[in-house]
Each structure stands twice: as structure tokens, then as C-alpha cells.
């Protein structure tokens, strides 16, 4: 069964893998469809307490200290948010998961801050106030973009050639010569 390696990231507990709903969700998306994550009553969210804070866009200090955020905005490569109150410097889990292979930088008010990965989530050791903006940016390597465009161009060319009859279709004249 694919996806068993996800336990290495620490973002899912071991028992969550025994539930068929988890695998059904993972077949349709990276972790689960956004419709499921937007539904606070889904059983999926109750299986993993870390997922609840990510979905709710909360900063996490510990199990009992979850800080809501405001001004939460995302793009394909960036996330911005603000805490609703002062948060002390030690170990703030951001509502973002990180894959080891992706290059990510974290900024507070345009100043880069160091981070670690704790339980699959980006964790910073910097205090923040309700006036601070936390900015997480993922950098997509140029070689990945080039591969994407080459693949897309190949698909367009193949579709064009097939629809124009230049590929996989013999003309009437070619068949009549046989």
C-alpha cells in the first residue's frame, strides 16, 4: 500500500493508517481533499490533532496553547498570516507542513528567521505579536519548472499531431498502395 512512509514525517499518528477513510482520502489528494478539510465534523480531523490546527490555521505552542491567526492568505508558493496575540519565543509550530526536498524560507516582517521541522511542521523559535506578519515562501527550482513546461509542450504537440492526422493515422493513399 502506498503512503506508508508518511509516518516518517510525524504528521500522522500510527493508528490513523488503520482507518480505510484515510486511504480513501489520500487516493484523491496529497493528504485529503479540501472539502474534507473544510468540514470540521469529518472524522478525519479527529484522528490527528495536528491536522486540526493546520486546517484551522492556528499556531501551536503545545497541546493546550493554540493561537488563532488572522489575515491568512495563500498562493501556490507563499503563505502569510498574523497571530491574534503575543507568542513567546520558544517553539512555535506554524500551520504549515514541509516536505524535506522543498526549499522553504520563513520571514517575520520581511526578516528571515531560522526554522526546524518538528512533527512534520515548520517550527520557529522567535516571539511574535499580533502586529507581526509571518511569511512562508517555497522556492520552486528552475529545473522543475523547465520539466513542467517541456511536458506540457509535449502534450500539446502530441494532441495537435493526433487531431491533424499526422500521427498514428495512415492516409487512404498509403493503404491503397499495399
Image: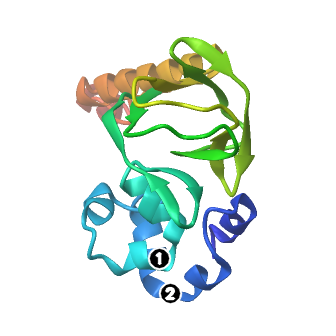
> 107 or 165, which lies in front?
107
What residue is shown with label 2?
A: 19
Q: Can you say whether 171 is above or below 91 in the image?
A: above
Classify residue 161 by image quadrant.
Answer: top left
Residue 24, image x, y percentages: 42, 75
Tell me the SS state at disc 2.
loop
Which disc, if any, is residue 53? none
Going by the image, does 6 lie left or right of 154? right
* Residue at screen point 35% across, 23% down: 156
CA distance separating discs 2 and 1: 6 Å
Q: Can you say whether 33 is above or below 81 in the image?
A: below
Tell me the SS state at disc 1.
helix
Identify the image quadrant of the C terminus: top left
* Residue at screen point 47% across, 76% down: 22
Q: Is residue 166 shown to the viewer in this render? A: no
* Residue at screen point 62% across, 85% down: 15
Residue 4, image x, y percentages: 68, 71
What residue is shown with label 1?
A: 22
Residue 123, image x, y percentages: 66, 43
Q: Is residue 129 shown to the viewer in this render? A: yes
Q: Can you say whether 58 is above or below 75 in the image?
A: below
Classify residue 122 by image quadrant.
Answer: top right
**Numbered circles on residues, count:** 2
Within 10 Å of disc 2 (Cα), the crowding (few <14, some 14-19, many 20+) is few
Residue 172, image x, y percentages: 24, 31
> 41 or 93, which lies in front?
93
Going by the image, does 74 lie left or right of 113? left
> 170 or 116, which lies in front?
116
Q: Are marks 2 and 1 in contact (CB under 8 Å)?
A: yes
Amino acid at each position: 500500500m502506498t503512503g506508508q512512509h508518511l509516518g516518517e514525517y510525524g504528521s500522522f499518528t500510527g493508528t490513523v493508517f488503520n482507518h480505510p477513510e484515510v486511504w480513501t482520502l489520500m487516493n484523491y489528494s496529497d493528504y485529503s481533499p479540501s472539502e474534507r478539510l473544510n468540514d470540521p465534523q469529518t472524522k478525519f480531523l479527529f484522528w490527528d490533532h495536528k491536522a486540526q490546527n493546520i486546517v484551522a490555521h492556528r499556531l501551536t505552542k503545545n497541546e493546550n496553547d493554540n493561537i488563532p491567526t488572522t489575515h491568512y492568505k495563500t498562493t501556490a508558493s507563499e503563505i502569510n498570516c498574523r497571530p491574534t496575540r503575543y507568542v513567546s519565543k520558544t517553539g512555535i509550530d506554524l500551520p504549515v507542513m514541509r516536505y524535506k526536498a522543498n526549499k522553504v524560507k520563513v520571514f517575520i516582517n520581511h526578516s528571515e528567521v531560522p526554522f526546524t521541522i518538528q512533527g512534520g511542521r515548520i517550527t520557529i523559535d522567535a516571539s511574535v505579536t499580533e502586529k507581526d506578519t509571518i511569511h512562508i515562501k517555497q522556492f520552486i527550482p528552475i529545473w522543475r519548472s523547465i520539466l513542467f513546461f517541456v511536458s506540457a509542450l509535449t502534450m500539446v504537440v502530441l494532441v495537435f499531431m493526433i487531431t491533424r492526422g499526422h500521427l498514428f493515422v495512415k492516409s487512404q493513399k498509403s493503404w491503397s498502395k499495399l
